[in-house]
Image (spheres, rainbow, N blue to C red):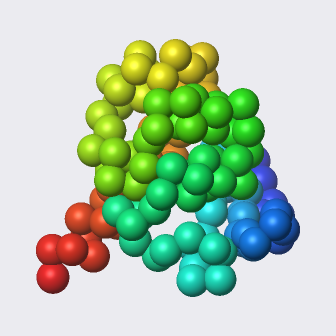
Amino acid sequence: MKKVSEVKETSVLPMLSVDMENKENGSLDVKNSVENGRPPDPADWAVTDVVNYFRTAGFEEQAIAFQEQEIDGKSLLLMTRNDVLTGLSLKLGPALKIYEYHIKPLQTQHLKNNSL
C-alpha cells in the first residue's frame, strides 16, 4: 500500500486560524485550539462556529445546510449518522465523511472530556 505523505498547512479566515493535516484516507484533521476562534468544547459552539468548522474542513457547500438547519454545538453532538445522511439533504459522499471524520470524533472527544 502506498503511503501518502502528510501535508500541513494553516488556513486563515477572518478571526479563524486552524491547523489542517491531510490524512491518508483523504479527510482533513482539523486541530481544535483556543486560538481558532471557537470555544474548545463543541457543546459551547454557536451555529456560526459549527458552520465555520465545516467550511474550514473543506465542506463549504455542506456548511450551508448546518446554517439553514440552525445546528449549534449541542445539536451537532446529538446528531446521529441517519440525521446527517438524510436530515441535511447532503450528497451521500460528503455526508458520510462529515459524520465519520468530523461529527463522530467530536462526539467521542466530548464524551471523554466530560466523563472524568
Task: State the image coordinates of residue 49 (x, y, percent, origin top left).
Answer: 56, 58
Horizontal placement of 113 versus 84: left or right? left
The N terminus - image quarter: top right
Q: Determine the residue positioned at 65% across, 83% down.
A: 35
Horizontal placement of 24 versus 40: left or right? right
Vertical arrangement, residue 99 with respect to residue 54, above or below: above
Task: State the image coordinates of residue 7 (x, y, percent, origin top left).
Answer: 82, 64
Q: Determine the residue positioned at 65% across, 54% down.
A: 52
Which of the 4 image quadrants contains residue 73? bottom left
Depth order, front residue of 109/33: 33
Which of the 4 image quadrants contains residue 83? top left
Q: Determine the residue positioned at 24% across, 65% down.
A: 111
Depth order, front residue of 8/42: 42
Horizontal placement of 3 versus 30: left or right? right
Task: State the image coordinates of residue 60 (x, y, percent, origin top left).
Answer: 73, 39
Question: Can you see residue 1?
Answer: no
Task: State the image coordinates of residue 68 (x, y, percent, origin top left).
Answer: 55, 30
The C terminus - image quarter: bottom left
Which residue lies most toward the left here? 115
Which of the 4 image quadrants contains residue 6? bottom right
Question: Can you see residue 116?
Answer: yes
Label count reads 0
Horizontal placement of 111 versus 94: left or right? left
Q: Determine the residue positioned at 71% across, 54% down.
A: 56
